[in-house]
Image: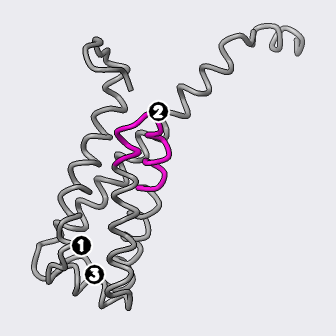
């Protein structure tokens, strides 16, 4: 991520905006996990993970948020993708999509986090691939085949 005061280009926004969305969504759920809101307790009780699982997931998500705002954002995106994919699996298998009458909001937010995490990972991989292949001349390879 660029330092404050530097101008941002559209290429920077491709991975910064999804990171901000992830941080906002995960960040707003953390107080509920740490403080033991009824909905969080119900969710983790259904999985058989209350209370240790709730605290463990909250700590892992906190670390992921810190990593997402650092230069190690790719690690934070991978952690977030892993945790939220597991949460989606639980929605499909044990919890259902309508948690305590929320109309599927929690599930919808988790899908948004998965999409944003994938966007960050794919963009990082694309930039990494460009960095390591910019010196290759692929025209020579196609000429040798002819």
Q: Magenta stretch containing residue 69, yes or no?
A: yes
Location of the N terminus by quadrant is top left
* Vertical order, 61 against 139 (above or below): below
Q: Residue at x 88, y 11 (%)?
A: 146
Q: Is residue 89 left or right of residue 107?
A: right
Vertical arrangement, residue 132 with respect to residue 57, above or below: above
Per the image, the residue denoted by label 1 is 33
Mark 1 Cα shell of 10 Å, populated few (<14), some (14-19), many (≥20): many
Disc 1 versus disc 2: nearer the observer: 1
Reply yes or no: does residue 67 show up in magenta.
yes
Q: Which mark is first along the chain, 3 or 1?
A: 1
Tags 1 and 3 touching, CB below 8 Å = no
Residue that carries the numbered disc 2 in the rendered image: 123
Residue 105: mark: none
Q: How is the image coloured?
A: one colour
Q: Is residue 126 left or right of residue 135?
A: left
In this rendered view, identify the residue nearer to me: 12 or 101: 12
Q: Main secondary structure of the magenta part?
A: helix
Residue 82 vertical position relative to residue 102 in the rendered view, above or below: above
Q: Tell me the number on the disc at residue 96.
A: 3
User: Considering only order in the chain, which callout, 2 or 1, is on the residue closer to the N terminus?
Assistant: 1
Q: Earlier in the sequence, mark 2 or mark 3?
A: 3
Q: Position of residue 98 (x, y in %)?
A: 18, 78
Q: Nearer the viewer, mark 1 or mark 3?
A: 1
Number of residues whose C-alpha sits closer than 10 Å to that of mark 3, classed few (under 14), some (14–19) or many (20 or more): some
Q: Please name which of the two marks, 2 or 3, marks the residue nearer to the observer.
A: 2
Magenta segment boundaries in residue numbering: 66-80
């Amino acid at each position: 991520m660029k330092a404050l005061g530097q101008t941002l280009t559209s290429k920077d926004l491709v991975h910064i905006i999804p990171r901000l969305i992830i941080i906002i969504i995960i960040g707003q759920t953390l107080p509920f996990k740490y403080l033991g809101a009824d909905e969080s307790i119900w969710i983790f009780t259904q999985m058989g993970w209350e209370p240790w699982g709730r605290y463990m997931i909250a700590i892992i998500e906190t670390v992921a948020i810190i990593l997402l705002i650092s230069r190690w954002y790719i690690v934070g995106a991978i952690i977030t993708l892993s945790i939220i994919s597991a949460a989606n699996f639980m929605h499909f298998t044990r919890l259902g999509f309508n948690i305590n009458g929320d109309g599927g909001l929690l599930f919808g937010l988790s899908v948004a986090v998965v999409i944003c995490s994938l966007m960050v990972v794919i963009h990082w991989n694309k930039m990494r691939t460009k960095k390591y292949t910019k010196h290759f001349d692929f025209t020579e390879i196609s000429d040798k085949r002819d």
